Image (cartoon, rainbow, N blue to C red):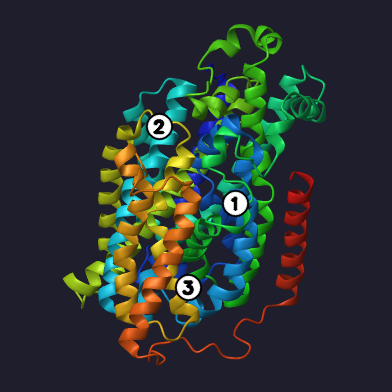
Amino acid sequence: MNFATIDYIIFAGYAALILGIGLWVSRKGEKTSEDYFLASKSLPWWAIGASLIAANISAEQFIGMSGSGFASGLAIASYEWMAAITLLIVGKYFLPIFIEKGLYTIPEFVEKRYSTQLKTILAVFWIGLYVFVNLSSVMYLGALALETIMGVPMMYGVIGLGLFAAAYSLYGGLSSVAWTDVVQVVFLVLGGLFTTYLALDTLSDGAGMMAGFNQVLEAVPERFHMILDKSNPEYVNLPGIWVLIGGLWVANLYYWGFNQYIIQRTLAAKSLKEAQKGIVLAASLKLLIPFIVVVPGIAAYVMVNDPEIMARLGDLGQVNIPSSGQSDKAYPWLLQLLPPGLKGVAFAALTAAIVSSLASMLNSTSTIFTMDIYKQYINKNASEETTVNVGRISAGVALIVSCIMAPLLGGIDQAFQFIQEYTGIVSPGILAVFVLGLFWKKATNKGAIWGAILSIPIAMYFKIGPKGWIESAVFVDIPFLHQMGLTCLLTMLVIAVVSNIDGKGAEDEKGIPLTKGLFDTSPVFNITAFAVSIIVVALYALLW
């Protein structure tokens, strides 16, 4: 891609602004662990909502989900629109318990509800997942974008993105991450909308966005169905109606309810009401995301398969053309079609998405290691200064390991699906442990430990699948969302059986008392939640 001087100026201005805000926020130094890991519990609702979206939307959405849109169409948007409903569930039913218990980390809840032993098991799970799947994949996809757009070698891109995120997040902690996210989300949304507008305008040869959108609808109407039938090649990833009533709920409830780098923002709120208002802001923004990240992928599919459009694009459109085996090149390919100036804005939006997620993941990885491993087993009496420094060091180590791992992910098509599948090995068991721990007083520590341990072989049984006629007699071949749903249900069954044997049917002494009024929410939350729910139902009814 040829960047004009104005593009470099815009991007440099973005980078200077983010670094400036991050360092300014952290200028006073973080004196306590609450300052560093929970932003002094001072975040207002609008910062929480913006930070939730900035932490969530990353290269896996801009690059990976756009690639899935190129490969299969709008159906992948279920991850976003169902997430809006999931956020409302988390805000109403999970947050009141988490905030009432004054948590730093999600594993800390496990200790209060079950035991230190189980907390450690899950903390190790999470650290491994964040470093080897989440951080590594975001770095890989971000570096892939830099390589495709600017020709930056993969390893240099990985190191550059890592250093950018580390420059303010390692020193400033969650305060720097959250407040820079407010700016990042503006770049992310506006830059994404610019890219969508110009992709559709280019497709329609300058007739405007709506003309381009109508052209896409006419060219590939089958790609605007949210519910795929079994004849669709992508059914294995998005299995029809089961997307609405099956395993996608496991993925979403785990991600938004029990994922440290997401839920940490709400734990840093001024109050429960502020956290809940931030949640409904994020849920509202979620409705917009598919138009920013999925529709461009569909537009790219129409463009590269239309000889007249490709001829009109000329030499500009012939570089890094996405194909059926390289879907994740769709979004970077579109960026090179933008005019000078807007390339810089769109590239800043993409970088904002990548860097904000990296910073969030680094901060949360260090939070779990420091609070749940270091202070538990290595130095129980660590001073506040030592605790914060260990947090910075552990984030740096996680960054180095993920930088080494990222290039090894090369060659993956539809990386968004890759992330979902491998996260799905761990998430069903964790979700089962938490849901029963929150809402079933008879769940015991022994039941939860057995459930967490056995959830991995259960998940791997479904993951392996039949490879030949011998394996076909033992293993099953089902979509991975079904795998996640069944793994969660079987894990719950294990926890229930062991708990009943262990506790002899009595309520566990650490069971959560669900008091009257615990789940009451404000009129603002209720009205906005109702509006978001109606819009989601209408979207599915329209695009069935």
In the image, 194: left or right of 72? Answer: right
User: Which is nearer the N-term, disc 3 or disc 2?
Assistant: 2
Q: Which residue is mark 1?
A: 243
Q: Residue at x 54, y 87 (%)?
A: 514
Residue 435 circle label: 3
Q: Which residue is mark 2?
A: 412
Residue 104 circle label: none
Q: Secondary structure at mark 1?
A: helix
Residue 16 visible, this angle: no
Q: Secondary structure at mark 3?
A: helix
- Mark 1 burial class by Cα count in 10 Å: few <14, some 14-19, many 20+: many
In the image, 495: left or right of 272? Answer: left
- Mark 2 burial class by Cα count in 10 Å: few <14, some 14-19, many 20+: some
User: Which is nearer the N-term, disc 1 or disc 2?
Assistant: 1
Q: CA distance from mark 3 to mark 2?
A: 33 Å
Which label lies toward us, 1 or 2? Answer: 1
Q: Position of residue 290 (x, y in %)?
A: 65, 43
Query: Is 497 drawn above or below residue 211 in the view shown?
Result: below
Query: Is 499 drawn above or below residue 27 in the view shown?
Result: below
Kindly check if marks 1 and 2 are in contact, taking CB atoms under 8 A apart as contact.
no
Q: CA distance from mark 3 to mark 1?
A: 20 Å
Q: Residue at x 33, y 38 (%)?
A: 469
Q: CA distance from mark 1 to mark 2?
A: 23 Å
Which label lies toward us, 3 or 1? Answer: 1
Q: Residue at x 71, y 27 (%)?
A: 220
Query: Is 39 drawn above or below residue 76 in the view shown?
Result: below
Q: Amino acid at mark 2?
A: Ile
